[in-house]
Amino acid sequence: MSINRKKSCEEGMVQKIDDTNELEVLKMENSRLQKLTQQDSLTGLLNRRAIESEVNKLLTDKISGVFLMMDIDEFKYINDKYGHLTGDRTLVELSRIMELCFFRKDLIGRIGGDEYAVFMPGEYKEDMIKNKVGSLNSRFKQAGQQLGINGRLCVTVGAEFSRDTDSFQTLYEKADIAMRIGKKDWNKALNFYKPTMKTSDAGMETRQNHSVAASDIKAISLQLRESNPAKGAYCQNYDAFISVYRFLVRGLSRTGSSVHMILVSMTDQDGVFISLDNRAFLMEKLRESLCSSLRSSDIYTRYSSCQFLAMLPGAALENMNIITTRIQNSFRVRVPDREDLLLSFSFYPLQPLQKDKRSTNKET
């Protein structure tokens, strides 16, 4: 073989290898992009479209299983009290635990917000599902403690066993109804769908019958109340705090109640707000001190970078020194090595709304 021909063959082989490598790289990149389109961006689980497609494939192949709809209890409370970053961390941690607790063949997806769907292919009995949900909620509670949300993390689950005529949508609708009805019973973490259940039972339709509608107020009351009230004062975001303030002010002229506000400021010895380097840590310790020192009927919020605002219904001016001393002592226990910090308190009693007095000119 001539040198030129040999060189040409070698170049052809190199080109072929390069083409093959480039093709493999493209395949890998396409696979990666396809996977990204199927994933929920926050948790890495299947997104709504992907889990619907995968479940329908299994059902088309006559593979039976059980469908679970999960909703995090009081997730709005977690977001409002601890912030949306903690809310996102909660969703990520809950998703991680589900991936550990379910089998690899099980399909887990985040439907949106704090709702998840799981399809478990195979034959299952109700007791097996109850044990699974019980184990999940036990681990969720532990995760809640580690996340600093007082172990409040748990889910309500609606379950439905698949039938030959089912699709993702029909399973979703049935399990969703069971889940929402289960939320009306605070002690029922798992609720299985029954044919007698109706959409209206889950509170998703307007009831036409007056006698039935009248009884809804009890269910609404149970939904509104806290299932596991946290100890200490009631923390709210600033917008909610303003709403409560205005609500209380409206009723003062009628009830004659005494409501005081306290502005708590953290500064150094010169009266200057503390520096950024450890502000987050110290303000969290102050928040804990407020929460433990105030009553469960009191409400507080973060007012500025170094201030909290609290509202104390039923508290009189003569009680303020007792309350502030309690806050001071609680804070010193939490940060005993920071004697350089000062807590200052300002008080103000809420005043009833004054009706507008508009003078009228009488023609004579």
Image: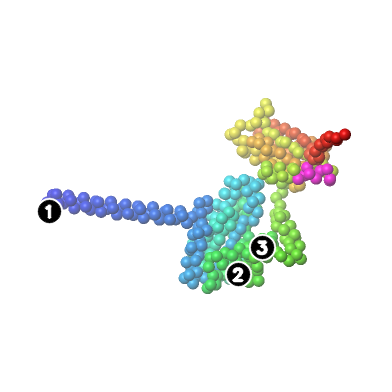
Mark drawn on residue 255: none
N-terminal label among 1 and 3: 1
Residue type pointed to by label 2: Glu
**In percent of the image, x 58 and y 51: which residue is there?**
90
Q: Is residue 334 left or right of residue 321?
A: left
Residue type pointed to by label 3: Glu
Extreme residue in the left direction: 2
Residue tagged by mark 2? 126
Residue type pointed to by label 1: Met
**Does residue 256 lie above or below 182 as drawn?**
above
Residue tagged by mark 3? 205
Residue 156, x across and y down, in percent: 63, 60
**Does residue 120 lie above or below 236 as drawn?**
below
Which region shows up in magenta? 247-255
Q: Foreground: 287 or 24?
A: 24
**In percent of the image, x 82 and y 41: which residue is there?**
258
Snapshot quadrant of residue 280: top right
**In percent of the image, x 14 and y 52: which residue is there?**
5
N-terminal label among 2 and 3: 2
Magenta-span inclusion, residue 252: yes
